[in-house]
């Protein structure tokens, strides 16, 4: 296949337009009069209007992996539509986040999601808990860059590494120049482009002569198993576990809190959370249809030929393959632009998310407590460049980074979500519970194994089975690990307070300083100290 010159020109123009919008937004953000320019970069000065917030919140979740992965799961005969959990899972997650988490986070005027954890559990635990989301954000950006590189190679016949480098440089430049405002304004353009481009591609793919009716193939075996799919009884536990992971595990991310903390009011923040959930679900529909079309296509009638994509191990590329082989070239180029837009809309969010926590919670509050606003801004920019370069380098190892990102996401779910719930809703927890909960959750998750990374399980939960030489956990161990972590934090916190308050252990051993004279510091988040009655007589009463 020859190099597609027109497609290359169109893609370069799209990148140039995105970069221009990002630079324009960065200049606009500098006009805001505030004593804290770092807050403008991180949370938009807490003055972002509703529509801008809604677009950027939706675009953050509708990334390259989201639209590619949805199409792939619908296409795979072993999965199908019933296994497409992300659209509903993210929608429910954003509803839960808006209902329970927006108010307590905004009441204290936090800048990042790590602020309440840092107030309650201190700098050491904050630094430890920063590691899982940092790893996940970097691997996330790397995974979607790798996906874009493979897509551009399919459609334009350009070496993937060129697309990876060019995309990463574009995202890094406009993100470090304008912070959240550059990310938000480019998200608006990218989201519109995703919606329009994929919607235009679908009719062309569906009427292609090689494609049968998707309504027929939904329930009939033609070229492969029906694309509706099914969930067998032994897999119900795993299906539920994955769904709850998407619902609850999607909450403890800075990308989410960055949007709701930047809104101009709490009411708008909650509405942004609710409506962006509906937007995520709606924007998955084009990808679902493309996956159904791929499952309904006789690939022998196309230039792709046989064997089919799943037999060649190219199921992950099913969306660009449909665009390239079932649509006219000018239409497929528009679809490629949609994928590129999706990659940038989630990539810039991941970069800004990790960099914001580093600059605000690590650099300002741990490494250099007397840092000026200018220093914090430079720490933010340098972190964006450093994390962006790391993700770009990792993108060339595309066979394993997606699995590493998924494992990182599970660690965020198992370790960070319980900690966030405790500091916001269970103020009686303390640093001792946080530390032990972290260690227990981390150990339980690693001992459960990871088949994608060939890590065998040490703990075989009920239903654990050997499939093609790999152990698969069918038991809902993710939710169990998260709940055990949560209960451990609560139990150890109360136990530590009890043994120090009763003088079972000497006060000098209280290295975390939860006891101060005759008081127990339950949580610095509440900024209150609850007096402990030490009199035996009073205790008896």
Image: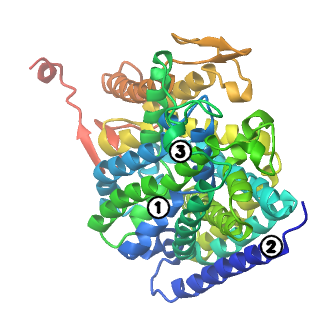
- As helix, strand or loop, the secondary structure at mark 3 comes to helix
- Percent x, y for residue 214? 53, 44
User: Do labels 3 and 2 touch, CB within 8 Å?
Assistant: no
The image quadrant where one finds the N terminus is bottom right
Number of the label disc, if any, that sits on residue 214: 3
Q: What quarter of the picture does the C terminus occupy? A: top left
Q: Secondary structure at mark 1?
A: helix
Label pair 3/1, CB-CB below 8 angstroms? no
- Residue 215 vs residue 358: left or right? left
What crowding class fits label 2: few (fewer than 14 Cα within 10 Å), some (14-19), or many (20 or more)?
Answer: some
N-term mark: 1 or 2: 2
Gap in angstroms between the C-alphas marked 1 and 2: 28 Å
Name the N-terminal-most of marks 3 and 2: 2
Labels 3 and 1: the sequence-earlier one: 1
Q: Residue at x 41, y 67 (%)?
A: 54
The disc placed on residue 8 is 2
**Residue receiving disc 1:** 58
Asked if residue 255 is positioned above or below residue 143 in the image, the reply reads below
**Left or right for 421, reference 182:** left
């Amino acid at each position: 296949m020859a190099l597609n010159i027109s497609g290359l020109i169109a893609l370069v123009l799209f990148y140039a337009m995105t970069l221009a919008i990002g630079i324009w937004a960065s200049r606009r953000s500098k006009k805001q009069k505030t004593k804290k320019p770092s807050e403008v970069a991180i949370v938009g000065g807490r003055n972002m209007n509703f529509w801008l917030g809604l677009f950027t919140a939706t675009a953050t979740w509708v990334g390259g992996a989201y639209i590619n992965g949805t199409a792939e799961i619908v296409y795979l005969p072993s999965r199908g539509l019933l296994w497409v959990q992300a659209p509903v899972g993210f929608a429910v997650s954003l509803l839960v986040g808006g209902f329970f988490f927006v108010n307590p986070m905004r009441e204290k005027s936090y800048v990042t999601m790590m602020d309440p954890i840092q107030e309650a559990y201190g700098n050491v635990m904050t630094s430890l808990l920063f590691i899982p989301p940092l790893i996940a954000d970097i691997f996330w950006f790397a995974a979607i860059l790798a996906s874009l590189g493979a897509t551009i190679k399919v459609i334009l016949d350009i070496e993937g590494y060129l697309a990876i480098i060019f995309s990463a440089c574009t995202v890094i430049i406009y993100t470090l120049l304008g912070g959240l405002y550059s990310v938000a304004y480019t998200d608006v353009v990218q989201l519109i482009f995703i919606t329009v481009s994929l919607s235009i591609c679908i009719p062309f793919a569906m009427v292609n002569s090689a494609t049968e009716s998707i309504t027929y193939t939904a329930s009939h075996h033609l070229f492969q198993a029906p694309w509706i799919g099914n969930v067998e009884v032994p897999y119900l536990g795993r299906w539920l576990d994955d769904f709850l992971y998407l619902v609850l595990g999607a909450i403890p991310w800075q990308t989410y809190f960055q949007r709701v903390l930047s809104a101009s009011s709490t009411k708008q923040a909650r509405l942004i959370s609710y409506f962006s959930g509906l937007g995520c679900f709606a924007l998955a529909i084009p990808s679902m249809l493309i996956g159904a079309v791929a499952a309904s296509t006789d690939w022998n009638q196309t230039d792709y030929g046989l064997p089919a994509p799943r037999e060649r191990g190219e199921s992950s590329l099913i969306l660009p393959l449909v665009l390239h082989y079932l649509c006219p070239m000018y239409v497929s180029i528009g679809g490629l632009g949609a994928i590129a837009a999706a990659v940038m809309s989630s990539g810039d969010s991941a970069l800004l998310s990790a960099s914001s926590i580093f600059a605000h919670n690590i650099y300002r509050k741990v490494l250099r407590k007397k840092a000026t606003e200018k220093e914090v801004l430079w720490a933010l920019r340098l972190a964006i460049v450093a994390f962006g370069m790391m993700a770009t380098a990792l993108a060339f190892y595309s066979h394993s980074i997606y699995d590493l990102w998924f494992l990182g996401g599970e660690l965020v779910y198992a370790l960070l979500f319980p900690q966030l719930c405790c500091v916001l809703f269970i103020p009686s927890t303390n640093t001792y519970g946080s530390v032990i909960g972290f260690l227990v959750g981390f150990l339980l998750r690693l001992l459960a194994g990871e088949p994608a990374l060939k890590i065998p399980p040490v703990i075989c939960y009920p239903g654990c089975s050997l499939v093609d030489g790999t152990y698969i956990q069918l038991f809902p161990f993710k939710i169990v690990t998260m709940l055990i972590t949560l209960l451990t934090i609560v139990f150890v916190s109360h136990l530590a307070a009890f043994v120090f308050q009763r003088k079972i252990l000497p006060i000098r051993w209280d290295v975390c300083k939860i006891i101060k004279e005759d008081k127990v510091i339950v949580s610095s988040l509440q900024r209150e100290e609850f007096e402990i009655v030490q009199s035996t007589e009073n205790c008896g009463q």
